[in-house]
Amino acid sequence: MFDSLSEKLQSAFSRLRGKGKVTEADINEAMREVRLALLEADVSLKVVRDFVGRVKEKALGAEVLESLQPWQQVVGIVNEELIGLLGGDEATINISGPSPTIIMLCGLQGAGKTTLAGKLGLYFKKQGRNPLLTACDIYRPAAVKQLQVLGSQISVPVFASDPEQHKSPPTIARLAVEHARQSGNDIVILDTAGRLAIDQDLMDELGQMRAMVKPTEILLVVDAMVGQDAVTFAQQFHDQLGLTGFIMTKMDSDTRGGAALSIRSVTGVPIKLMGVGEKLDALERFYPDRLASRILGMGDILSLIEKAQEAVDEKQAAALESKLRESRFNFNDFLAQLEQMNKMGPIENLLKMVPGMNREMMDQFNSVDSQKILSRKKAIVQSMTPAERGNPALINGPRRRRIANGCGQTVQQVNQFLNEFEQMRKIMRTMLNKMPGSKGGGAAPGALPAKGRKMPKGGRGSWFSR
């Protein structure tokens, strides 16, 4: 997500580091690089000019805080302006009105509306809602079938008209809303037809649908890879339909990011959600402050915590902590932890949310291909017997040779894994027992270590680098 832009912006500010005083020439040079980075990211020229002008004015007029280095002051100003450019405060989908909430998805062909409809259905289902997907695209071959398949995958009902009845999309939408009221569905998601380009027939049909069902939200689905063209057609949709928000798709690609950075500024309409992967659960709320922080390499701890909370069961976490304290953590627990990590997504994506994880560090991490390494470790565990997984102390020399043969690795690799596993258990037990609230300390279990406390030696990097 914005990898290229992020790298260039961080490079622009790296030259300011270590300077006791930032001069006007330093600011001008940094802003020139920022301007080029934004233009290369396909951000609108007007947006770039306004953005750079505001940053430069504030940077030259600001007093450097005594507690901050000058370059940090400049980066802070850029961060504030990026947040403003992306929309300021987060915007949410309005579901507080009378039931059912009607959400009309619109956009050009290829933006991913139908898949997005499925993601949106799952998104609301996880919140305890009872959504209804509605197939209003009667033109694209297999569009109705695609939505029905998605609905079955997430166990969300799909309303579709009988093809032989030849009902118009506005009529289908009206019938779907009536069906939702009778069936107790509190959210109706309308998957409408797209076109290769904006035409008046498309707008007229969407206008008729809007007049007939009066949607709570009219959301334009925008492919983040489109660039400045997205801003043009987004403005046209907004002028004729009165959009209430955008949903950006394909934000996980190394897109130039121009659409996301321009669309809010030009149209005044907020971005509400973003698709961050191909899986149906890869849909996130759009937080301008968090995205700005990621772009500037400042991490995104809040999103990382939320992903962890979604993946981790509290009871399992408490049981795991008890096992770690008492050295009862076994290979079954290890497999369970790998499964939770997989739920959170690729490790490299999670590391991007860690503050201070720059491109050089990411490249070093990616060079060891962590996913393959974890897969090899998983294969070792899966070659063990149930008794061995539950009691690592059983694994002697002959058993190690049998395990190595079973997973296609050498005895040395199995020995190294077992040694690392035992080292990890010791490190985690030491850390937990030093925490406040443990049997040797005094705050709640799971609290962060005291400020300044160092991680025991040997606990960093070894697990993923071998």
Image (tube, helix red, strand yellow):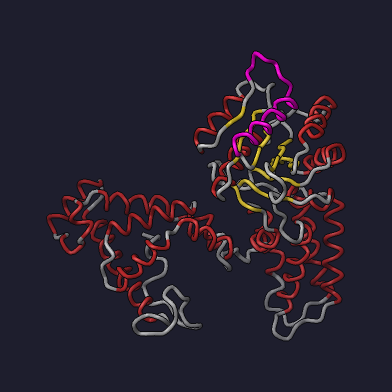
> Hey, which quadrant is residue 184 in on the image?
top right
Quarter of the picture holding the C terminus: bottom left
Q: Residue at the spot x=44%, y=78% of the render?
A: 444
Q: Is residue 309 left or right of residue 237?
A: left
Q: Position of residue 111 (x, y in %)?
A: 68, 36
In the image: residue 247, left or right of residue 148: right
The rendered magenta stretch, by its main secondary structure, is classed as helix
Residue furthest top as drawn: 164
Would residue 204 be found to the left or right of residue 416 on screen? Answer: right
- The residue range painted magenta reads 162-184
Of residue 384 and residue 405, the one placed in the foreground of this image is: 384
Q: Nearer the viewer, residue 153 or 226?
A: 153
Residue ranking furthest to the left:
398
Examine the rendering and report whether any part of residue 5 can be seen: yes
Residue in the picture at 83% in, 62% down: 52
Along the line of sight, the residue nearer the viewer: 305 or 466: 305
Residue most extreme to the front: 182
User: Going 79% across and 31% down the picture, which residue do you hit?
Assistant: 212
Using residue 134 as the reference point, say whether residue 345 is left or right of it: left
From the top left corner, tell me how far across and down residue 68 is, in percent. 70, 81
Residue 244, image x, y percentages: 78, 46
Q: Is residue 176 magenta?
A: yes
Q: How many marks?
A: 0
Position above or below: 18 against 242: below
User: Residue at 78% across / 61% down in the picture?
Assistant: 84
Q: From the viewer's perspective, is residue 393 above or below residue 249?
A: below
The x and y percentages for residue 412 are 23, 57
Task: Based on the picture, tell me whether residue 366 belongs to the magenta stretch.
Answer: no
Does residue 112 appear anywhere in the picture? no
